[in-house]
Image: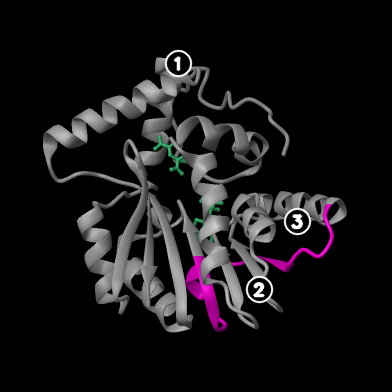
Amino acid sequence: MTQLPDRIYATPQARVADFVFNEDVVRVFPDMIKRSVPGYPAIVENIGVIAAQFAQPNTCLYDLGCSLGAVTQALRRHVKADNCRVLAVDNSAAMVERCREYLHAQDSMFQELLSVEVIERDILALEFQPSSLVALNFTLQFIAPEQRPALLGAIRRALVPGGALILSEKLRFADEGEQQLLTDLHIAFKRANGYSELEIAQKRSAIENVMKPDSLEVHRQRLLDAGFSKVVPWFQCLNFASLIALP
Ligand SMILES: C[S@@+](CC[C@H](N)C(=O)[O-])C[C@H]1O[C@@H](n2cnc3c(N)ncnc32)[C@H](O)[C@@H]1O
Ligand SMILES: O=C(O)C(=O)C[C@]1(C(=O)O)C=C[C@@H](O)C=C1
């Protein structure tokens, strides 16, 4: 993937607009997400490793909110089950267009990869096929909170026995001291990755209306309410975590 540096919030903006996954973001997205989400490369690679344990022949694997297809590429590197198909879905036309290019490049470099279809659609409007693995890698936090239970319910109903949902999210914390400490450490992480105070502040204003993190307890209860039987956190770095939810 190209590594153009993220300078989107480097100059002062009179009014910081709400964050959108448009062409400007697409251009710098690999750099942006790596410098903003602690543990992102480890999460993506290990989603492939975990998926290989759950993937079953003749089922679909979903990458929901696929962006540039980093998770889809990891699924294709690790999953060996017969006749599995990856369905990578995103509602940003700019993301989908670039995602298709990256996946064609992966096709030309490796043989015997799982087939993949990149679909430009709202994940709330999907009719899910029987699936053994669904990944929501930092996507649910961008779905309106009142729409999250129905989406998780639809995913649960699509999962075959022995399958799994992998859910990665930024977390918030009910305990004020914990929230403050991990927020400060996340800012320190961004600073250590070369973001200025201005970039950090403007990005925070841009995402505060569009990205609504929940606590681990809220995630766990909502997954259980959606019919999942077990929720197992497998990764946390600062205020970012990933969970495995079993049907
Ligand atoms: C933080 S990015 C996900 C990163 C990606 N999963 C990865 O691992 O690199 C969130 C993505 O979700 C997509 N998205 C947000 N709401 C969506 C919706 N309702 N339907 C489909 N995609 C959505 C955005 O366009 C964006 O590409
Ligand atoms: O929490 C932040 O400050 C972020 O920048 C997080 C986050 C995310 O978790 O998706 C937000 C938007 C961008 O897609 C990249 C990272």
In percent of width and height, residue 199 lies at 45, 22
Q: Disc 2 and disc 3: Cα gap in Å?
A: 23 Å
User: Of the residues shown, which amino acid type is indicated by label 1?
Assistant: Ser
- The residue at which mark 2 appears reads as 81
- The residue at which mark 1 appears reads as 196
Residue 77, magenta (yes or no): no
Left/right placement of residue 124 relative to residue 21 reads: left
User: Of the residues shown, which amino acid type is indicated by label 3?
Assistant: Arg
- The residue at which mark 3 appears reads as 100
| Residue range corresponding to the magenta coloring | 110-134
In percent of width and height, residue 156 lies at 40, 78
Whether 4 is drawn above or below 114: the answer is above
User: Of the residues shown, which amino acid type is indicated by label 2?
Assistant: Ala
The residue sitting at 52% across, 55% down in the picture is: 47
Left/right placement of residue 233 relative to residue 129 reads: left
Residue 128, magenta (yes or no): yes
Ranked by sequence position, the earlier of labels 2 and 3 is: 2
Compare residues 245 and 140 and report the one nearer the observer. 245
Q: Disc 2 and disc 1: Cα gap in Å?
A: 45 Å
| The N terminus - image quarter | top right
Secondary structure beneath label 2: loop
Instruction: State the scheme by which the image is colored.
Output: one colour
Compare residues 16 and 226 and report the one nearer the observer. 226
Q: Residues within 10 Å of mark 2 (few under 14, many from 20)?
A: some
In percent of width and height, residue 18 lies at 44, 40
